Image (spheres, coloured by chain):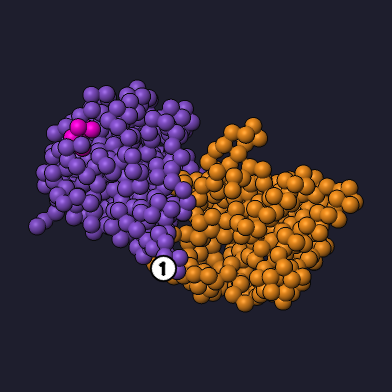
Chain colours: A purple, B orange
Amino acid sequence: MSVVDLSVDLGGIRMKNPVTVASGTFGYGKEYAELIDVSQLGAITVKGIRLQAWPGNPLPRHVEVPGGMVNAIGLQGPGVDGFVRDYMPFLRKTGVPVIVNIWGTSEDEYAEVARRLSDVEGVAGLELNISCPNVKEGGHAFGTDPRTVSALVAAVRRSTRLPLMPKLAPNVPDIKVFVRAAQEAGADALALINTLPAMVVDIEKRRPVLANKVGGLSGAAIHPVAVKLVWEAAQVARVPLLAMGGVMGPEQALEFLIVGATAVAVGTANFIDPSTPLRVLDGIAAYMKRHGMRSVKELTGSLVC
Amino acid sequence: MVDVTSKVLRQRPLNAGYWSLELDAAAIAGQARPGQFVHVRVPGLDQISLRRPFSIFGADEGVLKILYKTVGRGTAEMNRLSPGDPVQVIGPLGNGFPLEPKGLPLLVAGGYGVAPLCFLASRLSRAGVVLVGGRSSDDVLACEDFERMGWTVRVATQDGSRGEKGLVTALLDQELERLRALGETGELYACGPDGMLRAVGDRAIAAGFRGWLSLDKHMVCGVGACLACVQNLRREDGSTWIGRVCHDGPIFESREIIW
């Protein structure tokens, strides 16, 4: 029996440990099932889903940059009914809570996707994607105005009893305003951060590298930015925080927990080393033992400053 | 599919800028089929660089062989590897070529696209004709390997420095004409730049032969999760879908691809 208690409650999403994966970096779980034991994850967060199937952006959809990558996949996906039919059977078998990232182009669409997922066995919570920089119609447009965040969260709140976790945009002047807006509108938890809006130019062609022209920066480079935002968010948050942004190993995950996160997600690192989430988990447990901690909750918000 | 830490056995220079890297990776080599690829974490790059995909050039007796050209930061670092160095590799990945040709196998290679075709030739039950193309003689690789396996090798270079001057598809036209005159069927397999693949695919369709094309797309995850390397495709009934080159490919039949 483990001497450390790693379990956390992420706003009603009960996780046996604080490590999940970032939406869009882990497909629907089964893509990685041959490479890692996905049943060991605290939760599986799947790629963004809207009401209908969506083709995503033209190629190129990604470019490597120092310290990470810029992507503009554009939320390609099977639509909510296709997701439930084709991917939930495998996900249920893992026994791990499933967090579904949802998006839409209107409040009604978000609410309808949430409603359709409400009674699906195995779905433990919804991450509201209000901050994807790569889709004009939805996503980001909602996430950079606190009034639309508030209205959207309230609308989805009325359509489901599932735990709701809006994923906040990092490129706002004051993250605290968005934390308050989301939790007052009924959010049960908050996820942060999404990718940072970014652009890369091919200087020989003098064209943007990405077909979408702009994309979202992820990877090690954004980690200190994310730590600062999670720290600020934690100062006003009354709901638990799921932190992500450049977790490449246990050290970055521990930083997030220390500044106030309840759980962490591994994103871009999955592409480089698929065993990263399990390495992070082992590293958190080892740290706790080294520091004589019994529960991972002791780590959350333990920053001294 | 496994994620293993392999060891470098040797690094062999081919033509200028081209190298063959041999890795001790029995778990991957034992399962590998021609047309599949591996996803390599290049040591020496910082911990945060993405993996690089490479076609499998050979997989015999536990030795995984890849062929690469030094084109960028990743391949420059690969070039520094010495025997005994550890290299993390995920593989084998992707679907691979079908191995039952209807008629004479005709292989069309552009530059380092020769890699999966050389592995294919070693696993096909009958030898055929391989057409090797490149910009210059430096880009013409592995001809001796095919000859040793009893294949007929024909070469075309754009600058005429080796074989016929011109595009490899001109050689393909000649071979297809020869088969037509003999009333024989063939099966096409190709790997190379998109323009060449499209030209080969068009000729396969026109000749009524199957043409298996190995697409080369920039990849991120390599396992079908990230959707960075997608391709628009057509089913036999005419409906369309978006495939992942890493997971649903990299081999597609000419009629499937919507260019």
Secondary structure under badge 1? loop
Q: Is residue B254 above or below residue B83?
A: above
Asked if residue B84 shows in the view, the reply is no
Q: Position of residue B174 (x, y in %)?
A: 81, 59
Identity of the amino acid at label 1? Answer: Ile
Front in this rendered view, residue A251 or B57:
B57
Residue drawn at x 65%, y 66% as measured from the top left = B111
Residue drawn at x 21%, y 37% as measured from the top left = A149
Q: Give the range drawn in magenta.
A: A149-153
Q: In this view, does B241 lie above or below B192?
A: above
Residue drawn at x 55%, y 38% as measured from the top left = B241
Q: In this view, does A173 lie above or below A126?
A: below
Left or right of residue B53, residue A88 in this image: left
Where on the picture, by quarter, is residue B233? top right
Q: Position of residue A142 (x, y in %)?
A: 25, 39
Residue drawn at x 22%, y 40% as measured from the top left = A190
- Please give the residue where the numbered disc 1 appears in the rendered image: A203
Asked if residue A138 shows in the view, the reply is yes
- Residue lying at the far left in this picture: please name it: A305
Left or right of residue B82, residue A152 in this image: left
Front in this rendered view, residue A88 or A183:
A183
The number of callouts visible is 1
Please name the predominant secondary structure of the magenta segment in the image.
helix
Q: Is-magenta flag for residue A175?
A: no
Q: Position of residue B62 (x, y in %)?
A: 64, 59
Where on the picture, by quarter, is residue A121? top left
Q: Is-magenta flag for residue A150?
A: yes
- Residue lying at the far front in this picture: please name it: A206
Left or right of residue A23, residue B118 in this image: right
| Local crowd size for mark 1, using a 10 Å CA cut-off: few (<14), some (14–19), many (≥20) | few
Left or right of residue B210, residue B37 in this image: left
Q: Position of residue A129 (x, y in %)?
A: 30, 39
